[in-house]
Image: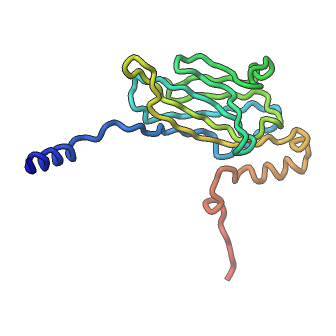
Amino acid sequence: MRLLATALAALLASAPAPDVCEALNVTVSPGPTVRYSEGDNATLYCHISQKRKTDNLLAVRWVFAVSPTQEYLMIKMTKFGSVQYYGNYTHHFHKQRLRLLKEKHGTMYKFLILSLQQTDQGHYICKVQEIGKHRNKWTAWSNGTAATEIRVISSKTSDDPTYKKKHEAWKFFEGKDASNCCWLHTRC
């Protein structure tokens, strides 16, 4: 009996582990922070990889966060590809300004915010859920989240000639590690 228990334990130890819910790899670009002038159109991309099964479907949500405690669901693309608007974003004015499009065989989603305003400044979070059929029921298999921050430069500020000079001077360094851009030159 003891030999049987030992053999069973060895067999179970060598058996593959059951499938466990794993996280999707989700990234948002551009990021981590992007600047736009008021009135510009913003394009954010949500890239998704490492789906568990190729035939599973994705539900993609974009959430707006003014602060970490204030999140608002804006727009969602369902697992079947239909787009739904939520909260204040259901109003006709916002529906005209927001677009969510599927690209690259469902591995990338493009979120457009047209005619940016100061109130659009904040964090944008892409939340993705992988959904598949299991025993004739839709089941969530994995999730993933990524975020970026949009900063909206006031049209008053961007019209100021001194702002333009400063902005152009520093634009070269945006998104770069300053240690890779700057050289210190000293004389001995």
Q: Is residue 101 or residue 90 the one in the foreground?
A: 90
Which residue lies at the image location 70% right of the left edge and 45% below the top edge?
68
> Where's residue 161, x and y in %?
91, 47
Splitting the image into 4 quarters, where does residue 182 fall? bottom right
> Where's residue 169, x and y in %?
78, 53
User: Does residue 39 lie above or below 68 as drawn?
Assistant: above
> Where's residue 145, x and y in %?
56, 39
Which residue lies at the image location 63% right of the left edge and 57% below the top edge?
177
Q: Is residue 187 left or right of residue 157?
A: left
User: Does residue 45 lie above or below 178 as drawn?
Assistant: above
Splitting the image into 4 quarters, where does residue 108 fall? top right
State the residue lying farthest toward the front. 1
Q: Is residue 187 or residue 25 the one in the foreground?
A: 25
Which residue lies at the image location 68% right of the left edge and 46% below the top edge?
33
User: Does residue 40 lie above or below 91 as drawn?
Assistant: below
Q: Is residue 93 or residue 177 the one in the foreground?
A: 93
Q: Tell me the colour scheme of the image.
A: rainbow
> Where's residue 176, x and y in %?
64, 53
Count of residue discs: 0
Quadrant in which the C terminus is drawn: bottom right
